[in-house]
Image (tube, rainbow, N blue to C red):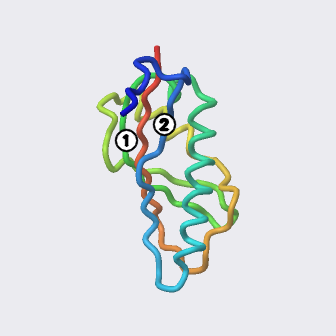
Amino acid sequence: SRVPPAIPLAASDLSLGTLRVRGSGGNDARLQDYSQGVQMDIQNALRKNPRTRDGSYRAVLDLWIDPARTIERTELFRSTGDRERDAAVAATLRGVTISRPAPANTPQPVRVGIVVNSLQ
């Protein structure tokens, strides 16, 4: 079995953990597609801000996305353990436009788990 390299190839590894979008029956494929879109949009937003891109932390947030597909409200469900970083993550995500429309009857809020591990 191959041993993974000790030093990651990418300088920044920002990954989102499980993104739980509680769905109503029948929309599973569309919900999955939407979830992936939300993940990409959030990752891109967090990568642009040095305060949310760097370091190692985990957080879980609830997001309310308005009909215009903009994140209008965020609420911390699980803290990063750093109040300044919590505020930076929330501020970075508020106002982000989600690239894909939500399937009909997608419940709010959308809960996202964020895991960031980057080299300092």
Q: Are marks 1 and 2 in contact (CB under 8 Å)?
A: yes
Frontmost of labels 1 and 2 is: 1
**79 displayed left or right of 43:** left
Q: Please identify the residue farthest to the top as the structure is shown.
A: 120
Please count the marks in the image. 2
Q: Earlier in the sequence, mark 1 or mark 2?
A: 1
Q: In the image shown, does 58 or 71 lie closer to the viewer? A: 58
Residue 116 picture location, percent across and down:
44, 33
Amino acid type, residue under disc 1 in the picture = Ala
Residue 15 picture location, percent across and down:
48, 40
The numbered dot on residue 103 is none
Amino acid type, residue under disc 2 in the picture = Val
Q: In the image shown, does 23 or 63 lie closer to the viewer? A: 23
Residue 73 picture location, percent across and down:
51, 53
Q: Please identify the residue farthest to the bottom as the structure is shown.
A: 26
The numbered dot on residue 59 is 1
Q: Is residue 13 above or below residue 5?
A: below
The numbered dot on residue 89 is 2
Q: Secondary structure at mark 2?
A: helix
